[in-house]
Image: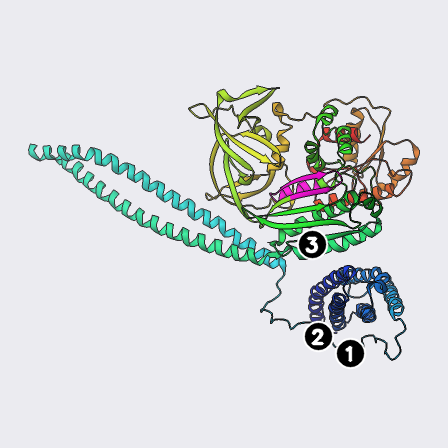
Amino acid sequence: MGTKDQDFLKRLQATFKVEAAEHLKAIAAGLLELERADAPEARQEIIQAVFREAHSLKGAARAVNLVEIEAVCQALENVLARWKGQDQAAAAAGFDVLHQAVVLIERRVSAESAGATPAEQAQLNEIAGRLGRVARAAAAPAAEGDAPVPAAPESSPALPDREPRPAAAESVRVSLAKLQELLRQSEDFLAAKLGAGHLLTAINDIGATLGAWREKWDRVQPAVQAQRRSGERAGPAPQADRLSEFLQWDEAYHKSLESQLAGLAQTAARSHRLLSRMVETLTGDLKQVLMLPCQPALDILPRLMRDLSRSQGKDAELIIQGGELEIDRRILDEIKDPLIHLVRNCIDHGIETPEERRRQHKPVRGRIVIAIRPTAGGKVEMRVSDDGAGIDATQLRHTTARLGVISPAAAENAEDSELLPLIFEPGVSTSPIITDISGRGLGLAILREKIEKLGGSYSVASQPGQGTTFHLVLPITLATFRGTLVRLGSRVLVVPTKNVEQVRRVPRSEVRTVENRETIELNGQAVSLVSLARVLELPEAPPAGDPEGLLPVVVLTLADKRLAFRVDEILNEQEVLEKPLGRQLARVRNLSGATILGTGELAPILNAADVMKSATRSGPAVLKPVPEEFEDLSGQTILVAEDSITARTLLKNILEAAGYRVVTAVDGIDAFGKLAEGDVALVVSDVDMPRLGGFDLTAKLRGDPRFEELPVVLVTALESPEDRQRGIDAGANAYIVKSSFDQSNLLETIKRLI
């Protein structure tokens, strides 16, 4: 095959992947719908639709010479052809096989290799054989005079649609990466728009300066004219004449400047309006192109729920409302994993077994509802609810007190509704055991992190025996946002306005000290006052305030938290385009990115969630003190698995200084071997290690009855939500990122787990 033919085949295979994904999604959804269908007419329509998708996929696979997929699709067609005319009970036993076939085809389609590996080929052959057995089992003896339903022949055309399809609008496939790059380039014009606005402001300021000169000239002009007339009566005076001529020239020159400046101001204003309109139109149109219905991103959930429910012996249905609502594709990508985790939690923690639901006089089949609707302010609301057992407040009270999230006395006296927000704290779980689905207390913490990153909010409500509802509010689209500009010394920083409750100037006399914390009163409530410079570890000048003795203050809110930050000056509010800091600075504490101001100056953008967390550890404004001394726990042994000798030595010194005995290992294999040598109370492990990494070591421990309850703390440089999710899936009890490593945080975590 020539080079051109190979290039053409690669392009054809890329097109096939996109088309196959659409067919497979339709087949999976159709099978789920078919399982729930009761009416014979509805079942026949669904079978016909699924048959049509399988037949189209078979033809597409044949076109790119993927004979193994073609064979499985042919087997699928045979089963569907046999199911026509039969009731639901006759087909029930085969659904698992059909779903497994779809999963195997999906894996093969997404594989990078052109041909199937021997293992893949064996799996596809095996599933085709099982489909054949399902088809033969469905071929019940036909009634006398009836011909058996034949399998679809190789050359049979696709079945006709139930209704004529409307003519599709003209469209073209464009890669998402290209669209996102175009949007990024269009958003870059915002800097030009802001620059034009700054130029217009500068011209107007110069005009104001000339206007001030004109006022002063008008006030002294009568005296100058009187002096000129007096000089004329006194006779010739060369110096006076030259001064008079200069003043006349000066007045005419300034009038000319004023006229030219007025023309420039009109031109700049017109250009600014035109540029603003073009930028807003261009970015708005591209944002609309990137808007997608929520439903495709949620299509994975029904099958996930089916598999988890069956594995746990439960019966549940998933209802999605508002799936047609369009949201920015980037937000859908970010929220997909949290929604998966919530559905898993609903099944594992919420929905009861059929026997338990009967005992409580509930419908045997549980309900999980995802309701999506738009709200004011360009946001979307997502509610994930179930009708299960609800959150166990007693268990939550015990867990939060044991982990030190709140004191035992506070846990005992708190209302159930006050405890519920604590389930988003790392390590908090009401599950009595660690499972492969949930129970490690990291999933909801990751959900919180993603929601905060997107600038959204979250809350939870629960009623014992009635169910739990998670309430998420997210922006419909990303890109530009409003930012409040503040000054610290010579630095200008941007605070996202969505997190700013108010800005104000507070009289110094109203600042009070309560329990060694500065506070101010807002709406009748005491709110901690923190120096933003101290939180950001910048040089801090004494709070001078303005000549009237007023301190500039920015009040930030996030979820149920509220803090006031003292700054040197509050400048203004403007539209902001956030730029990432680059791979080398992918995660910098307290910063989310940077932006270019209209002056061309680079200004950091603060991460409100990080800043508020940092404020709880900054000097006198500490809200939740971190223990500085730990009791002597010399009877406890900790195993440290770390391939870097520097990091291994650091961790060993920290732990030994806190009173622990420490055993070290150079990788996961070494660590697993040393576990048998002594009584180890906890494992601290790196993730990226030779031979056996931290994820695999954790999974290996969880699979061994001797170590399945042994606490594992992963300390790693990998900080993406996906990596943290891998830590959850592996069975880690805690996940600490090295870039934000805190010695007290590590010791506090260990103390909670041992």
Q: Residue furthest right?
A: 677
**Mark 2 — residue?**
160
Q: Secondary structure at mark 1?
A: loop
Amino acid type of the residue tagged 1 in the rendering: Ser
Q: Nearer the viewer, mark 2 or mark 3?
A: 2
Residue 732, relative to residue 72: is it above or below?
A: above
Q: Secondary structure at mark 2?
A: loop
Disc 2 versus disc 3: distance between alpha carbons?
28 Å
- Quarter of the image containing the N terminus? bottom right
Locate residue 120, reporting x and y percent. 84, 62
Image: magenta residue range: 445-471
Locate residue 90, reporting x and y percent. 85, 65
The image quadrant of residue 148 is bottom right
The image quadrant of residue 101 is bottom right
Q: In the image, 506: left or right of 208?
A: right
**Mark 3 — residue?**
298
